[in-house]
Structures are given as structure tokens and as C-alpha cells.
Amino acid sequence: MAEQQADPLAEWRLRQEPYYQPVGHEIAAFDAARTARLPLLLKGPTGCGKTRFVEHMAWRLQLPLITVACHEDLSASDLAGRWLLDAQGTRWMDGPLAQAVRHGGLCYLDEFMEARADTTVLLHPLADTRRVLSLERCGELLHAHPDFQLIVSYNPGYQGIHRELKPSTRQRFVAMNFDYPDPPTETGIVQREGLASSELAGQLVRFAVRTRHLRDEGLEEGASTRMLVHAALLARAGLSPHDATMQAIADPLSDDPDVGAVLRALVLASF
Ligand code: ADP
């Protein structure tokens, strides 16, 4: 208990250094945004390394990282906090955002496009020069700790059913674009993360690059780095490269029978 009071965000600290292979100038870009105290918007396809990058930065900065996956049922009070009733009576409990603001940490809101309007509006005074979070329900105006930083991410290729960020939200952030790493870099990542030989990692990356050109065939998004790592791990667990790629990539990627047939043919041609 005493330990918890000494570091209220202890549970959000990373215990191990996350492996991250830089792919461009993203570390300098992050550092500049942090120095300028500007919130960050990370844009890029799913599974291309956005979350890993944020984990890496949290580790470098030795700051806790509070991650929240946004969805349409996430309310402003899920982020800000709520009153709880227990044996001692009612007490206020900070939500994850309020904890990061109060004690100083990185707050990473993943799938930000899925967030409801009341959630995004809550962020406005936090994401501009005011750097405050209004905890209306407990009557407190929280001034952000100097270490607090807001980071949100979304995939511009997939915007859910109907969503668009409002200009008033969008314009408070500085953006960083992410994409799949170049093939040699991605091969190195798959080798390391998937414990794969360079030959298999290279084959997987070449296959992935081909799937990323299948938009015209109806595939919204091709194989991500994450999927390549999964395939490599299945191969390491004993599957043939063909079966591992089917199971980790081709089958999960699409339910459409025509796209499925194209992917199966591509797997056969590649392994
Ligand atoms: P997202 O963009 O969806 O947040 P993640 O950061 O979770 O994607 O990346 C998915 C996986 O891909 C990671 O768990 C990691 O194995 C691998 N990965 C992608 N890019 C990198 C990178 N630059 N360095 C190390 N691992 C990476």
C-alpha cells in the first residue's frame, strides 16, 4: 500500500525494454512534440508498429504508459473517473486519463476514431495550451503534470462506419504518419520478433508486400507486420511455412470467398 502511494502509476510502468526498430525519424519527431508540449496523433495501418513505438518512447523516457482502447461505448467518465460506493462511503476514483494527467505519464488512446464525441470533447482543454482536465463530477479542474503527454492513434484506411475527426479535435494535434517498414527493416523485425530465419522472414515480407497491392481485388488492407510475426511464430511451433501463412495471414485477412481464393493462390505461389 505504502509502495502504491509512492508511485501511484507503478502498475503502468513497463517492466522490460520493448524491442523497437526505428524506421525513420519518428523518435526525433516524438521528442520535438514532447518538448513543445503538443499532443500527438499517430496515423497508420493496423499492426505497423504504432503501439510498439509508444511503448518504446515510454521506456526511453522512463514514464508510465496508460493505454486505453477506444470504442463506441467508452464514455467520458470511463476516462475521467467516477464516484464509487464502498464500506467507507463514497470516494472518487480517477479514470485512466485523469491518473496520467494528475501523476504524469503518457496516455495513449488507441483506435481514437472509435471514440464518442463526448470523449473527444473532454480532451480539448487538455490538448491545447490550457492543459487541463475538467473532472466535472467531482468539481476538480486538474492541471496536467509536466510529464503528461497525450497520444492518440487511428488507422486512416479504416474509419469505422461513419466516423471522422472534427476539425476542432484534429487541429489540436501534431501528426506522425506510420507505414509498414521497408522490406529489409521489416525482415529484420520479423526475424527478431518471430524468431525466424532471415530466409523465412524475407519470404513472409515478400508475400506481405504482394497482399498490400490487392486493394483492387477487394482487400481493404494487406498483411501487417503483426501478422508476419504470427506466421513466423507458427512456423517456429512446427507448421510448414505454407500452413503457417494460411493460418496466420490468409485466413484471418478476409471472409470474402473471392479474396480468399486470391490469397490462397498467393500463398501457394510464395511458399
Ligand atoms: P499498431 O500499429 O496496430 O499499434 P503494433 O505496434 O502493435 O501495431 O505492432 C504489431 C507488432 O508488429 C508488434 O507487436 C511487433 O511485434 C511488430 N512491429 C511492428 N513494427 C515494429 C518495429 N518498428 N519494431 C519492432 N517491432 C515492430
Image: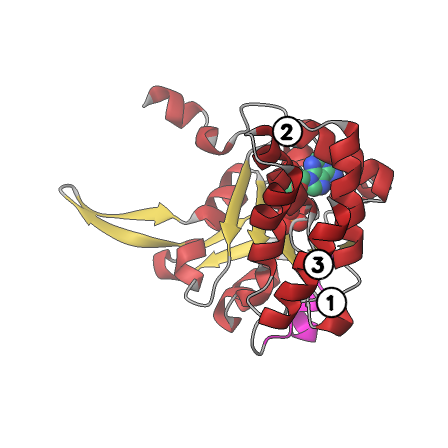
Q: In the rendered image, which quarter contains the C terminus?
A: top right
- Mark 2 CB near ligand 1 (8 Å cut): yes
**Residue 18 marker:** 2
Image coordinates for residue 264, horizontal then vertical, percent: 66, 57
Crowding near the residue tagged with mark 3, few <14, some 14–19, many ≥20 C-alpha atoms within 10 Å = few
Q: Quadrant of the N terminus?
A: top left
Q: CA distance from mark 1 to mark 2?
A: 31 Å
Amino acid type of the residue that numbered disc 1 sits on in the rendered structure: Gln
254 sits to left or right of 12: right
Secondary structure beneath dot 3 equals helix
Please identify the quarter of the rendering in which residue 31 is found. top right
Q: Are marks 3 and 2 in contact (CB under 8 Å)?
A: no
Q: Residue at x 58, y 70 (%)?
A: 256
x then y, percent, for residue 43 = 72, 57
- Observer able to see residue 54: no
SS for callout 1: loop
Taking depth in this image into account, of 134 and 261 the one nearest to the observer is: 261
Q: CA distance from mark 3 to mark 2?
A: 36 Å
Tell me which segment is drawn in magenta. 163-174
Residue marked by disc 1 = 171
Label whose residue precedes the other's in the sequence (3 or 2): 2
> Circle 3 is placed at which residue position?
265
Q: Amino acid at mark 2?
A: Pro
What number is the disc on residue 232? none
Q: Which residue: 71% across, 51% down? A: 268
* Image coords of residue 246 (percent x, y): 60, 49
Precedes in sequence: disc 1 or disc 2: 2
Ligand 1 located in image quadrant: top right
Instruction: Decide: few, some or many residues near mark 2? Use Cα within 10 Å; few <14, some 14-19, many ≥20.
Output: some
As for residue 151 lying within the magenta part, the answer is: no
